[in-house]
Amino acid sequence: MKANRQAAVVGIGSTNYFKRGRSSPATIQELGAQAILAALDDAGLAVDDLDGFVYFALGLDTGWFAEALGVPTIRFSASAGTGGNASASSVALAATVVEAGVADVVVSVMATHQPPAARFGSAFAYRPPTPESDFENLFGLLAPGHAFALIAQRYMHEFGVTREHLYQVVRTQRDYGLTRPKSLFDRSITREEYFSARMISDPLCLYDYTLESDGAVAVITTTADRAKDLPNPPVYVLGGAMAGDGRWGRGMNWLGMDDDLFTTAGTRRTADELYAKSGLTPGDVDVALLYDHFSPAVLLQLEDYGFCGRGEAGDFVADGNTKIDGRLPVNTHGGHLGEAYIVGMTHVAEGVEQLRGTAINQIPGAEIALVTGGPSGLPVGAVLFGSSAR
Amino acid sequence: MSETRWDVVHAPVMPAVALGLSPHSEPFWEAARQRRLVVARCTHCGAYSMPPKGFCPSCRRQDQQFVEVSGRATLYTYTVVRHAVISALAVPYVLAIVKLPDAEDLKMLSNIVDCELKDIRIGQQLEVVFQDQADGVTVPRFRPVH
């Protein structure tokens, strides 16, 4: 019989989540290793089976994991990127590696560990200056939120999207997060709280920003053949993309994009690639896990990935379409805005749980899940998961 | 300590940020010191780009020059920064992306100054002003044309 090397996710694991810096004295490597062991355990696999590693953050190191966990053989190791744009890419790359026969059991792992000296959202001004940074720092563009606020303001101006729409995004996700035991929030949010919150960078207020969190999530990808003998129902990788329109460039880190792209998430090309590779359409997607570093990112991606027209995402959310009984439930785990910020990897784990049928906020009969990486600079990754093989 | 005035636009003054000057960016800041706004333009095909990186993204030649523009601009988008990411920074200040009509509507990041927050409108006409910082750097910013 012909070998079936189609990639399937068979294990997910995570540490507890912590507010920024509170995971100390654990190191970033230690958090990563704990998540890897938890994911292997979930998969019914052992360290001896593991032969590939994919990262998208600085600070994780294959040599360290090999020493600490006694990994006998390494056949593949790579970084899929250096930030949230590569969260789904890390699984897309693992799937490519497995299908090509380069390695058999690949872990994609993200860990965040943010003592005061290593804040993720810290001021760009503390980074070493570059010729490009002069054109940001000197004007006071110092943080990711500043860049996203500039995009959001123009988007809202062009399409009549309002802060009420942003509130609906935040409220929906905070409500989803209520049932999540690892969530860093213990309650939802009221409209009054949202509209009386501190403005950080107009039009974004405190609640439009993700928390900064510590923790780790690991995801195990192997072949369909191997998955048959494992305890969990396999979640197949039906398509993966690490793509973009070149005119987006560094995106949020540039802000010189052409007008037709400026008011998007810069991920339309990623979406095209993903649907073409998988043969699926937006209408096939049962649940979407959209990277949400800032609340407007959810709206922009709903448009880029084809779930509604340009400028329609605010009403799409306000009409309840993204709630659990809506047309397209979005970020059913609470996402970054309503659970914790492990740089997109909780979205991957939720996509897997939804298709296993074991999610806490389960969508009945979910068969196809979209998981996206963070709109920022090129390339941005995304994957489509399916409960059935293609 | 004086009370923060939320209605007036400050200019952001960056405390002790070293300029990472390279041959590609240095002429921009030197021109600003001379009260001239310049942008990068390809000497071969004429395409504009900012910030300058040394290559023309249209014809790929590595022969950009800085050309002077009038300093007229329109406001494309902005944000009122109300949280001081660096504690020494006075807030609020306004980050803006302006379009330069003299350079085929090239987008440029800068600030809006010399006006009240309530008077800022996307699409409004702006003109460049040059502000000298204590560290000797001159920063081109924009104000509404009245």
Image (cartoon, grey):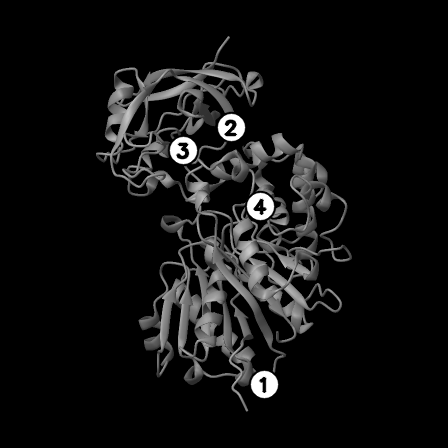
Chain on which label 3 sits: B
Instruction: Write the residue at 35% across / 34% down.
Output: B51
Q: Is residue A373 left or right of residue B58?
A: right
Residue A11 vs A146, above or below: the answer is below
Dot label at residue A297: 4
- Kindly identify which residue carries mark 2: B78
Instruction: Write the residue at 30% across / 17% down.
Output: B36
Pick the quarter of the image with the C terminus of chain A.
bottom right
Instruction: Write the residue at 48% across / 19% down.
Output: B9
| Mark 3 burial class by Cα count in 10 Å: few <14, some 14-19, many 20+ | few
Dot label at residue A228: 1
- In-front residue for pair A104/B102: B102
Q: Position of residue A5 (x, y in %)?
A: 51, 80
Q: What amino acid type should be assigned to the residue bearing mark 3?
A: Ser
Q: What amino acid type should be assigned to the residue bearing mark 2?
A: Tyr
Residue A332 vs A156, above or below: the answer is below
Q: How many angstroms separate mark 1 from mark 3 (CA)?
A: 56 Å
Element type at mark 4: helix
Q: What amino acid type should be assigned to the residue bearing mark 1?
A: Lys
Discs 2 and 3 carry the same chain letter: yes
Which label sits in the foreground, 2 or 3?
Answer: 2
Dot label at residue B49: none
Q: Is residue A29 left or right of residue A339?
A: left
- Kindly identify which residue carries mark 3: B87
Element type at mark 1: loop
